[in-house]
Image (cartoon, rainbow, N blue to C red):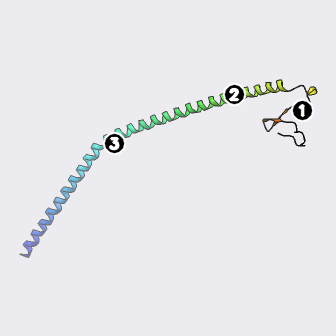
Amino acid sequence: MLFASTLALGACLWLVWHELRRLARREQHGQREAAEQLQPHLAAMNERLGGELARHRRDAEQLERNLEASVRRRLEELQSLLESLRAIEAKLQARLAPPAAEAPPGTVAKEARGGFSVIARPPKAGSGDPQV
């Protein structure tokens, strides 16, 4: 009887082991099928995303070039405006400045200090300091 029960228990263990092995193979097969089905979708998505990234990169580079060109144009415009203002200032100084020999004692003189035009006023009556 002991032999028969041991034999029956061994047969049960073999059946359980065989069933578990069959389930494991079925699970592996299911995983392979799922991976094979997902592979083309993932490849297509990867290709699409790669194209989108390349397009965004090109757009960003184009925007950067446009912005850089715009800033350069604005700087050139500002430089030309500054040059025009300097030329106008020089003309005004030449018009307003009396000849050096004929300058009356109480006139206003213009001086250049640190790149800026400064009007030097004559001292007020009663004070020894010139106002600037």
User: Depth-wise, is mark 3 or mark 1 nearer the camera?
Assistant: 1
Relative to the observer, which residue lies in front, 28 or 2?
A: 28
User: Helix, strand or loop at disc 3?
Assistant: helix
Residue receiving disc 3: 42
Mark 2 secondary-structure assignment: helix
Secondary element at tag 1: loop
* Nearest to the observer: residue 87 or residue 95: 95
Q: Amino acid at mark 2?
A: Leu
Q: Considering only order in the chain, which callout, 2 or 1, is on the residue closer to the N terminus? A: 2
> Residue most toward the left?
1
Report the residue at 59% width, 33% height from top.
Answer: 68
Amino acid at dot 3: Leu
Find residue 109 and report its horizontal and vertical position in percent: 85, 32
- Locate the C terminus and report the quarter of the image it occupies: top right
Determine which residue is flagged by label 2: 81
Crowd rating for badge 2 (residues with CA inside 10 Å; few <14, some 14–19, many 20+): few
Q: Could you tell me how far apart the alpha carbons at marks 1 and 2 are, in whole angstroms?
A: 34 Å
Label placed on residue 106: 1
The picture quadrant where one finds residue 43 is: top left
Label number found at residue 49: none
Q: Is residue 77 left or right of residue 33?
A: right
Residue occupying the point 65% across, 31% down: 75
Marks 3/1: CA distance?
Answer: 88 Å
Q: Label 3: few (<14), some or many (≥20) within 10 Å?
A: few
The reply to whether dot 3 and dot 1 touch (C-beta < 8 Å) is no
